[in-house]
């Protein structure tokens, strides 16, 4: 039903000093099949809402294509777009802010019908009564106001309004996150019943992975504007292929605390989407990042410190002096240590550093200390960079990106260099680390 190809949605920075855009969605490709529920998961800020909004044209795509039944909807305008909009709707997370408190429930649900001049006024009223019934509300609720309802009922009102024009495709943006746990299951059941009755196709955006596991046929895992893995839900949950999926799933509390899967601690926060890494988007935090030849056996703590050091160099390169303080906070460091020497001491003071590594690091730190961060970063990457950081055959950063690899017979795809035959499997690497 939906075919998305190399879709990008960038937001202008709005700053005169730095006009780099926020790359909220940075080149995603996937399909959604008619009648299925595709889950979209990932940390806050990874671009889920932007992707959902772009799919139904509430946001303009910067580049790429979105085909609905063969028509590229990024190209349509005017009447054609207006007509098409009836087909694709969105349910929002927060029923409180998405319903107009000065309108009655009947008016709220009827509004899309009025806007599209659907049939006669009497038929519209009849349709609204029917919709209220379908979502489990009473006919007498027609003349009440949203504030007279509980959170769950308000979400039912939002869903009735969404269904008014008989859409085929609905983006559900965290539809139950704002609700009490006891009410969440009711709304989820309602959404499933409506899907069967009206043959709906859903994109289900969620933080809560247990809800996703319950409701979605397939899942797409998003990180920093990219899809890292996409495939059938159960198989992705039981046998994740991508290092980021491993990390995301490892954060779910397990019913059996002695179960073997270890929690993976991700260091730092996701990079700023205005300055994504030049290689794999997850490379700066990946627990399975490929190491260059000669460093495979390096101590894990030292390897993590090296990665933090690279990130500090990367950010220093573009940071103004005053911003550097904030940076140090982000990496959990005392801001009063302002010099490169102190940063170095903090990162490497407590780990054993082999002589040959120390020699390179000292050279890098000295160069950075002289404020030549670009040169320092180049030197660092020559020594410790790998394909994950975008380093190509020439040994320097060429912006090399991973490819999508099919990782199961069902056609599940994962975006990671680890699937290339010369590297060890992600699961082995993560297990060895733990
Ligand atoms: N209108 C906007 N203008 C500029 N930047 C924006 C805008 N909307 C979102 N962003 C930025 O784009 C990135 C992706 O945001 P988005 O809301 O799509 O992520 P998300 O995964 O849905 O997050 P959440 O789970 O918190 O809703 C973030 O860095 C965000 O700050």
Image: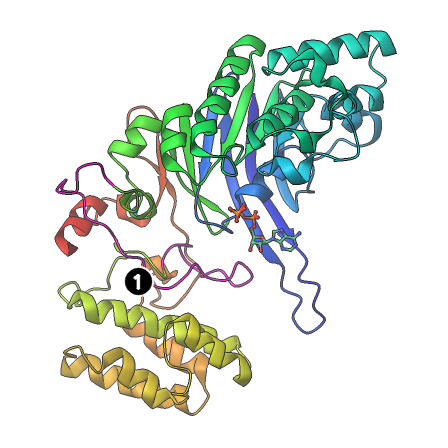
Which secondary structure class fits the magenta region best?
A: loop
Instruction: Tell which of 199 and 311 is nearer to you.
Output: 199
Give yes or no for residue 271 being in the magenta stretch.
yes
Q: Residue 311's spot in the image, x, y percent?
A: 39, 70
Does residue 416 appear left or right of residue 42 in this picture? left
Q: Quadrant of residue 6?
A: top right
| Residue drawn 66% across the image and 19% down it | 163
Q: Which residues are magenta?
A: 254-283
Q: At numbered mark 1, what does the secondary structure look like: helix, strand or loop?
A: loop
Q: Residue 216's spot in the image, x, y percent?
A: 42, 25
On the question of residue 381 being in view, the answer is no
- In the picture, which quadrant includes the N terminus? top right
Does residue 259 appear left or right of residue 367 in this picture? left
Give yes or no for residue 167 being in the magenta stretch.
no
| Residue drawn 14% across the image and 78% down it | 352
So how many labels did they put on this image? 1
Instruction: Tell which of 36 and 111 is nearer to you.
Output: 111
Q: Is residue 382 above or below residue 231?
A: below
């Amino acid at each position: 039903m939906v075919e998305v190809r190399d879709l990008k949605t960038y937001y202008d920075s709005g700053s005169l000093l730095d006009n780099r855009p926020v790359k909220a969605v940075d080149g995603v490709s996937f399909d959604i099949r008619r009648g299925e529920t595709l889950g979209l998961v990932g940390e806050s800020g990874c671009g889920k809402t932007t992707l959902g909004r772009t799919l139904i044209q509430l946001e303009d795509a910067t580049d790429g294509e979105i085909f609905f039944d063969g028509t590229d909807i990024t190209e349509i305008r005017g009447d054609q777009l207006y007509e098409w909009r009836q087909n694709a709707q969105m349910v929002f997370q927060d029923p409180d802010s998405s319903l107009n408190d000065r309108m009655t429930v009947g008016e709220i649900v009827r509004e899309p019908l009025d806007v599209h001049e659907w049939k006669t006024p009497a038929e519209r009223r009849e349709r609204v009564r029917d919709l209220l019934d379908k979502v489990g509300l009473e006919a007498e609720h027609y003349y009440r106001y949203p504030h007279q309802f509980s959170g769950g009922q308000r979400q039912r009102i939002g869903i009735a309004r969404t269904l008014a024009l008989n859409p085929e495709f609905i983006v559900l943006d965290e539809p139950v996150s704002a609700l009490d746990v006891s009410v969440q299951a009711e709304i989820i059941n309602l959404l499933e019943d409506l899907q069967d009755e009206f043959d709906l196709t859903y994109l289900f955006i969620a933080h809560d992975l247990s809800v996703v596991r319950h409701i979605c046929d397939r899942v797409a895992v998003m990180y920093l504007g990219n899809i890292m893995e996409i495939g059938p839900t159960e198989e992705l949950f039981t046998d994740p292929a991508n290092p980021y999926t491993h990390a995301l799933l490892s954060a779910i509390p397990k019913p059996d605390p002695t179960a073997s899967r270890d929690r993976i601690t991700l260091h730092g926060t996701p990079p700023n989407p205005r300055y994504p890494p030049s290689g794999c988007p997850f490379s700066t935090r990946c627990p399975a990042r490929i190491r260059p030849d000669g460093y495979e056996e390096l101590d894990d703590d030292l390897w993590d410190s090296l990665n933090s050091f690279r990130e500090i160099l990367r950010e220093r390169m573009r940071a103004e002096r005053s911003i550097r303080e904030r940076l140090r906070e982000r990496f959990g460091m005392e801001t009063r240590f302002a010099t490169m020497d102190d940063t170095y001491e903090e990162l490497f003071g407590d780990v054993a550093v082999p002589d040959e590594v120390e020699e390179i690091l000292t050279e890098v730190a000295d160069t950075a200390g002289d404020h030549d961060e670009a040169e320092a970063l180049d030197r660092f990457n020559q020594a410790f960079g790998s394909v994950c950081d975008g380093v190509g055959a020439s040994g320097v950063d060429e912006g090399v990106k991973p490819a999508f690899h099919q990782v199961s017979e069902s056609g599940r795809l994962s975006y990671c260099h680890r699937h290339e035959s010369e590297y060890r499997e992600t699961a082995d690497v993560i297990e060895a680390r733990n």
